[in-house]
Structure formats: structure tokens, C-alpha cells
Image: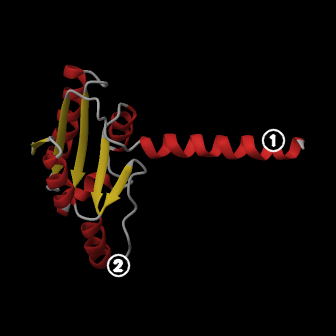
Amino acid sequence: MKLLHVKQMLLLCMAVVAMFSMSAHAAKDFADVKVVLQISDPNPMKQTLVLNVANNLIKHYGQDRVDVEIVAFGPGLRLLFAENSNKDRISSLAGNGVRFSACSNTVKAMSKKLGYAPELNSNAKTVPAGVVQIVDLVKKGYTLVKP
């Protein structure tokens, strides 16, 4: 009988962990301000700028009042490569609730060009198409900013 309770508790714990990990990339429906930032440029200065803008939004509105998603596609996908020099900043922003979306179409195209699939930052979630992700977020009331 005790073994059954242990299994039930284990299953409950696993369900709770799964819920939290799924919600880590979920939109903040309660946020007052919703912003989607586009990065489609390989220029390191633009990559830094988009991260600065995300940070400034959090500083100004507060982590709980702003919802920020950075969508990377085309040459801008390089921002979300695992070994990008901004990986620590990305991790810090993700810890403050910023979501990072990587275009699956771009990943496929880059994989063909490079001869291997690029390893993405662990904070990046792939979406079918970066542009579609942006359009869908704008339909949901997000403001598009392309720094």
C-alpha cells in the first residue's frame, strides 16, 4: 500500500515540474505591456541592441508588468546560437521572463548551408516560422519593435 502512495506522489511531483517547465515559455497574460522584438540581422551591434531594448523594457515597466518575446529569424538567428557571445545576457533576460523564439525554417535552411544543425541556446524555443510568430503575437495585442 505504501508503494502505491510513493508512486502517486512521484507522479504528482513530475506533473508539477512539467507544468512549471511548460509555463516558463508561456506568455504573461496579466502583463500591462506586451512587446515582440524582431531580430533578423546578423550584425552583432543589432543583436546587442535588441537585448538592451528587452532589458530597458523590464527596467522601466517591471518584470511582472511587461511581456517580452524576442523572435529571431534569417541571419538574426545567430543571436540564439548556443555559443553566441551574448549567451549570458540571454540567460539573464530569460530569468526575468523574456522568451526567445527561433525560426524553424531558418534552422533548416542554415543546417543545409552549414552541413549540420546549429546548436541553439537552451533558452530558445523553436517556432514553425519566425514571421508567423510575430504576426500571431501582433494579432494578440503585442507591439512589434524592430531595433
Q: Residue at x 50, y 40 (%)?
A: 20
Q: How many marks?
A: 2
Q: Are marks 2 and 1 in contact (CB under 8 Å)?
A: no
- Compute the Cα span from label 2 to label 1: 50 Å
The residue lying toward the viewer, choosing from 62 and 26, is: 26
For marks 2 and 1, the one nearer the N-term is 1
Q: Residue at x 28, y 65 (%)?
A: 128
Q: Split into 4 quadrants, where in the image is the C terminus?
A: top left
- Helix, strand or loop at disc 2? loop
Q: Split into 4 quadrants, where in the image is the N terminus?
A: top right
For disc 1, the neighbor class at 10 Å (few under 14, some 14 to 19, many from 20) is: few
Answer with the quarter of the image where residue 29 lies: top left
Amino acid type indicated by mark 1: His
Please state the horizontal and vertical placement of residue 14, each as a whole percent of the image. Answer: 63, 45
Q: Residue at x 21, y 56 (%)?
A: 133
The residue lying toward the viewer, choosing from 41 and 19, is: 19
- Helix, strand or loop at disc 1? helix
According to the image, label 1 marks what residue? 5
Name the front one of labels 2 and 1: 1
State how the image is colored. secondary structure
Q: Which mark is residue 20?
A: none
Please state the horizontal and vertical placement of residue 52, each as a whole percent of the image. Answer: 20, 34
The residue lying toward the viewer, choosing from 95 and 11, is: 11
* Above or below, 39 relative to 59: below
Is 22 displayed left or right of 61 in the figure? right
Can you name the residue that lies furthest to the front here?
A: 1
According to the image, label 2 marks what residue? 115
Please state the horizontal and vertical placement of residue 97, each as a whole percent of the image. Answer: 35, 34
